[in-house]
Amino acid sequence: MSTIGDLTRLLEQIPLWKALRALPDRVAALERRVEALEAELAARPVAESCLLCGGTLKVTDIQPDRHFGKLGLQTHTLTCEGCGKSQTRQVDPSKSGR
Ligand SMILES: [Zn+2]
């Protein structure tokens, strides 16, 4: 006669059963890691992409805007890490959080 205890001991000998029993804990651990990574990603500033090659643009210079600097606007020079070309952006630091 087989009991539930015998059946459980039998199932414990099957590697797939052991893997299935560990699955809820592994999924919970993965969910915590994904949440931590998503929070870290949300905290990072979004890097712009180069319109010419798709490379990452980095701010390499910040100057008061030539026309509207007295109003607080800035001109940011962004240089592409891929192709090395530069682009400029007019930025209002009060709106961009920079
Ligand atoms: Zn580029």
Image: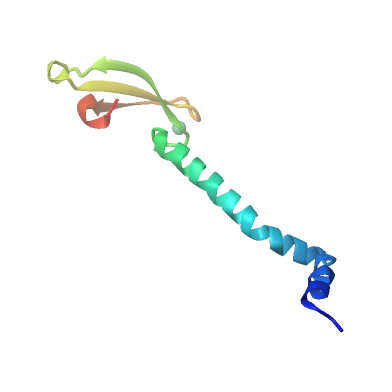
Q: Quadrant of residue 58?
A: top left
For the residue pair 50 and 52, the one nearer the viewer reads as 50
**Vertical order, 60 against 92 (above or below):** above
Residue 61 % position (x, y) = 35, 17
Q: In the drawing, does residue 15 fall left or right of residue 50? A: right
Q: How is the image coloured?
A: rainbow
**Vertical order, 26 against 44 (above or below):** below
Q: In the drawing, does residue 24 fall left or right of residue 41? A: right
Q: Quadrant of the C terminus?
A: top left
Q: Is residue 53 visible?
A: no
Q: Residue at x 77, y 65 (%)?
A: 16
Q: Residue at x 49, y 46 (%)?
A: 35
Q: Residue at x 54, y 47 (%)?
A: 32
For the residue pair 91 and 22, the one nearer the viewer reads as 22
Q: Quadrant of residue 45?
A: top left
Residue 49 % position (x, y) = 41, 36
Residue 89 % position (x, y) = 28, 28
Q: In the drawing, does residue 69 fall left or right of residue 14? A: left
Q: Quadrant of the N terminus?
A: bottom right
**Vertical order, 17 against 85 (above or below):** below
Ligand 1 image position (quadrant): top left
